[in-house]
Amino acid sequence: MKIIVCVKQVPDTTEVKIDKKTNTLIREGVPSILNPDDANALEEALALKEKYDDVKVTVLSMGPPQADVMLRECLAMGADEAILLSDRAFGGSDTWATSNALAAAIRKIGEYDIIFAGRQAIDGDTAQVGPQISEKLGIPQITYVEKMELLGDKVRVQRQLEDGYEVIEASMPILLTAVKELNEPRHMYIDKIFDAYEKEIPILTINDVDITTAEVGLKASPTRVFRSFTPEVKGQGVILEGTEKEVAAKLVNEFKHAHII
Ligand SMILES: Cc1cc2nc3c(=O)[nH]c(=O)nc-3n(C[C@H](O)[C@H](O)[C@H](O)COP(=O)(O)OP(=O)(O)OC[C@H]3O[C@@H](n4cnc5c(N)ncnc54)[C@H](O)[C@@H]3O)c2cc1C
C-alpha cells in the first residue's frame, strides 16, 4: 500500500508575540516546525506501516529549500521517502494554486492508496488545501478524521463533528485529513536521524510536474491578500470588587453590555 502525506513547514505560531509598542508581530527567533495536524497525519501513516506489510510512506511538501529540514524530521520519524516541490514559480500561491501544485506532484508520484493531509495549517489556517487536492485528483475525501482502520480495500473512519461524530466507510484511493485527536505523534528515532541526513531528497520544480504558470504562483491565484495587519492588543483586564453576589451581578451586567450573553 502506498501512502502520501502532505506536510507543511510553518512558523510556530505559539511562539509569535506582539510588539506592544509598534503593534507588529515579532517573528525573530520564531522556529519553523512541522505543522501539528500534519504530524498526526504522518503518525497515522507510520502506524499503518507498522501494522501491515508492504506499506510505503512518502512525505510531500511544497515550500522553500529550508523545508528540507522538516522533511528530514519526517524521515527520522520513520517515513520512507521525502519529496520537496520547490520553485520560485510557486511563490505567493493561495490555496487554489497550492492545491494545483500538490495535486500535480501527486500525479507525478503516480501510485497512492491513501493521501493524508492535516485538517489545517496553523499559519494560513484555511483548512482548504486537503479537500481541494482530492477534488483535483477526482478521489473521495473524508475530513476531520479522529479514528481510522483499514478493512481490505476500504477505510472506516470516525469523523469529528462539533457535537459528536459520524462513522464513514469509503473505498481507496481516498484523501483523509487528520485532527489532533487521531493519535499522539511519535518523536524522531535517534538512529534514524543519521539516516535521514544521508538520504537524498528529490526537489521537483515546475518543469518536473505537469503544470504551467497559469495554475500556480501569485499571479495565477484567484485570491490576493489586500491588506494584513496585527490585531490590536487587548486593554488591561478589570478586577471586579465586592461580595461574591455583587461581583457575579457586575459580571453578568458587563457580559450583557458586551452582548456576550
Ligand atoms: C487570500 C490568500 C492569499 C495568500 N497569499 C499568499 C502569498 O502571497 N504568499 C504566501 O506565501 N502565502 C500566501 N497565502 C498562504 C497560502 O495560500 C497558504 O499558506 C497555502 O495556500 C496553504 O493554505 P493553508 O496554510 O491555509 O493550509 P490549509 O489548507 O490549512 O492546510 C491543510 C493541509 O494541507 C496541507 N498543505 C497545505 N499547504 C501545504 C504545502 N505547502 N505543502 C504540503 N502540504 C500542504 C497540509 O497537510 C495541511 O495540514 C495566501 C493565503 C490566502 C488565503
Image (cartoon, grey):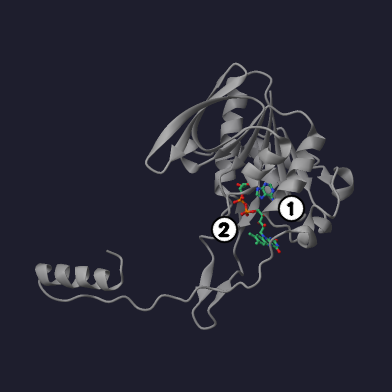
Residue furthest toward the right? 207
Residue drawn at (53%, 63%), measured in percent from left and top? 15
- The image position of residue 3, as x and y in percent, is 67, 30
Q: Which mark is residue 218?
A: none
Q: Which image quarter has ligand 1?
A: bottom right
Q: Nearer the viewer, residue 159 or 14?
A: 159
Residue drawn at (10%, 68%), measured in percent from left and top? 245
Q: Which residue is mark 2?
A: 12
Residue drawn at (59%, 58%), measured in percent from left and top? 123
In this picture, is 2 found above or below 135? above
Locate residue 243 relative to residue 232 in the image: left or right. Answer: left
Residue 111, quarter of the rendered image: top right
**Callout 1: CB less than 8 Å from ligand 1:** yes
Q: Nearer the viewer, residue 135 or 44?
A: 135
Marked residue nearer the N-terminal end (2 or 1):
2
What separation in Å lies between label 2 and label 1 (alpha carbons)? 24 Å
Instruction: Characterize the local packing of mark 1: few (<14), some (14-19) or many (20 or more) Cα atoms within 10 angstroms.
Output: many
Locate residue 92 relative to residue 162 in the image: left or right. Answer: right
State whether residue 193 appears in this view. Answer: no
Residue 103, quarter of the rendered image: top right
| Quadrant of the frame with the N terminus | top right
Q: Which residue is mark 1?
A: 97
Instruction: Characterize the local packing of mark 2: few (<14), some (14-19) or many (20 or more) Cα atoms within 10 angstroms.
Output: some
- The image position of residue 252, as x and y in percent, is 20, 68
Residue furthest toward the top? 152
